[in-house]
Structure formats: structure tokens, C-alpha cells
Image (cartoon, rainbow, N blue to C red):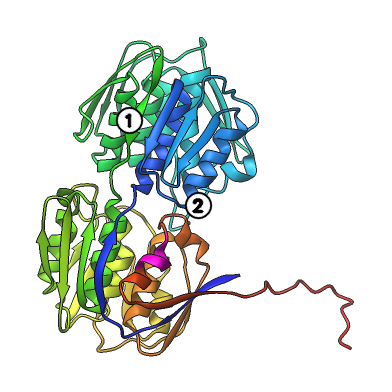
Amino acid sequence: MEKYVIHGGNRLFGEVEISGAKNAAVAIIPAALLVNGVCRIENIPQISDADTLLSILSSLNAKVRMINPSTLEIDCTNATCEGAPYSKMRRIRASYYFIGSMLGRFGHVKTTMPGGCNFGVRPIDQHVKGMNALGAEIDVNGGFIYGKALDGHLHGAKIYLDKISVGATMNIIIAAATAEGRTIIENAAREPHIVDLANFLNSMGADIRGAGTDTVKVYGTPVLHGGSYSIIPDQIEAGTYMVAAAAAGGEVLIRNIIPRHLECISAKLREMGVTVEEYEDSVLVKSEGRLRRTNIKTQPYPGFPTDMQPQITAALSLAAGTSVVTEGVWDNRYKYVNELRKMGAQIQVDGKTAIVEGVEKLSGAPVASCDLRAGAAMVIAGLCAQGETIVEDIHYIERGYENFLGKLTRLGADIRLITEPDEPETSGDARVG
């Protein structure tokens, strides 16, 4: 069992390089299944979710070759639809992108219901609606997803999403890329990683227009060819280090970013009294003294991202005054609040709203990562707390942050990894001798 041990109180200084976007990579890797030829993909983040998806591709007879730690080549020319390890497919949320890529490539699919972080009901009904509109029959039964194109291949269609869904928008784009005819997706999500997925597919010969707006048009291309592509920087990783610097204090230059993707985060930090200076591909965060209160409401892009809600709440727990955090995307993303309370945070949750009464200090305590972003929030709280904080279940954090410990250490954080043996299971007749 691996844990982080943090001794708080150190301000953060220096530079941090942002890795490739997790939320783009986990869609682009399954989308490579559509390509006949070699895809060279650069700026792949070194995270466990990417490793799992690459392992799934390999099991489908795709050839995956690492060029260096952040660059790889994928050749799906001889890939098949059989052999996916369901134990891995059910481990992460992004496995549902294989629904779109398998239907687009083979005309049929069998996979598991997706897993990943548990912070509320996350149905796939909009995904199913999209696949049905494209001419596929989908059956969800016993934890498995079965699907087939009724006449062997998908057909373009006009699809209106009942609610804005990043995953459904991306999955439909993947499926429609090689479908016959034109697909129009209305009420589409507009996140940067949706644009990145479309740009990746276009670089392989697809014809996708309007990504980043609420209407996406996909003109089906029967065969996609190989090519090269570099994944955009991770908006959420960058935002996490921005909030860490704001909460712990100090001066941190965050490099390899796209500043406009961070505008909503920068604006809120400025409201909290933090200096944020934007440059061409970097942002400088300076923080001195106590943070000021502010209100947050998470919304689809370009609003404040739900994936930054736990981190900003951890910072607001130390801000002067009362802040209100409203979750506008998921039903239940406040499970981590109980962990912050162990450290002395004063937070009350009512449905989708959290009332945060800022305290002057947090105290170190043993806490757990409830999910990926909640884990990052626990680390931020530990960096600010007096005494020792132990963060458990850090496998959630490793799903989405490349070398989190190493990057924080280089900024001056007192954080280290410890490994403890798992507690052995005891049987009913165990004896103490």
C-alpha cells in the first residue's frame, strides 16, 4: 500500500512543466483503433489510465511501440475486436470510448460498463442515444455493453444531446468519423480535449468541423490513414498547480500551457487575491498572505471546470470569510469534504452546494483520496496544514497526474512516498502464538 506523507508549511517556488492532457489522451488512444496505419502520438501523459488503455489496445492485436516516455507509435492495421481484457476495461471510465471506435471500425462491440472515480451517477444514456441514431443496436446487460451496426456499418445522423456531455460528444465523434454520410451533433460539449480529439482524427484523414462549438459536423471518411499528432497540455493539471501555489503561498511558473484554457481558473484566483501573470505558453502564480473568499459554480467549458472543484474548495477552506461552492455538473462530488473536516476545515454540504467557512489553519491528519481530483485536493490541504498529513489510496491520483510527487518536490514541497505492506487477511481459525 503506497501513501504520501506530507509535512506542511513550505511555500512553493520554481517551475513546473505540464504534461499532455489526460482527458484528451484517454479518448485519442481508443480512437487510434479507427486508423489503418501508424499513428505517432506525442505528449502522452505518463499516467496509469493511459497505460491501461494502451494495454487494452495491445490485447486487440494492435502494435504499440514506445519511442520515448511521452511518445509512442500505434499501428492498428491488423487489430481485431476480440480479446479485450474485461478486468481492465471495467477499471476506468474512458473504456467507453471503445464503443465508438469498435463500432466504427468493426461494426460491433462487446465491452464492460465503465469504471473510474465514483462521485455520483454517470449514466451512458446519451452515448447509447448517439449510437442508436448512427444505426447501432446497443444492449446493456449484466454489466456488459453489446452493440452492432444493423447493416454492418454506421450511417450519419442528426443527434441532439439532451444534456451537455463531454463523453457522449467525444464518443459520437469517434463513431461518426468513419460512418457513411454526415453526422451533426447539436448541444455538443465544447471542452478543449474535444477539439484535440477532432484535430487528432482530422490529422489522420477525418473531416470533422465545429469542434469547440455547440454544433459539430462529421463527414464520414471510410478509411483513416496514419500520421503524427501532439496532445495539448493538461488544463486540469495546470490548474491544480496554480491552486497549490495559491494555497501554500510562493511563486510558481507553470510552463507548457495554453493560457486561454485556464482563464476561468485564473479569474477566480485573482478574485482570491492571487497574482496571475499570463505569457505566451506559461503562467506565473504569486501568492502572499491569506486568500480571500469567493463563490464558485462549476459549469461546462468555458465555465469553471468540475474537475477543479475539490482543489479550489481545499484552498477556500483557508480563505478569509465564507465561500459558496456550487456543483453544476455532477450529483455527488463532495465525498472528500469529510476528509477535509478531519484536518479542521469547516464545510457544510447541502445537495450540490458547499458552504465553506474559512479557518486560519488546517492540521495534518490521515486522509484518503476518494477519487482522482479529491486526491489532489487532499495533497493541497496537506501542503498547507500544520504537522503531518498522510494521504492514502494514491492510486486514484496516479490515474491522472504524471509524477505528481516529483514535480511538487522540485517546487519545495516536503512530500514523500512510503510503501507499507497490505494487511493480511485472517481466516476464522487464525491462531496467535
Name the residue rendered at 51%, 13% in the picture: 150
Disc 1 residue type (three-letter): Phe
Q: N-terminal of the two: label 2 or label 1?
A: 2
Q: Quadrant of residue 429?
A: bottom right
Residue 187: % across, % down: 24, 34
Q: Main secondary structure of the magenta part?
A: helix
The residue lying toward the viewer, choosing from 146 and 272, is 272
**Is residue 92 visible to us here?**
yes
* Quadrant where the image shows the C terminus: bottom right
Which residue is identified by label 1? 200
Name the residue rendered at 26%, 60% in the picture: 239
- Is residue 413 a member of the stretch shown in magenta? no
Which residue is identified by label 2? 48
Residue 118: % across, % down: 48, 57
Residue bounds of the magenta highlight? 403-407
Residue 300: % across, % down: 24, 48
Q: Is residue 1 left or right of residue 9?
A: right
> Relative to 4, is 34 above or below?
above
Q: Is residue 258 left or right of residue 142?
A: left
**Few, some or many C-alpha atoms within 10 Å of disc 1 (few <14, some 14-19, many ≥20)?**
many
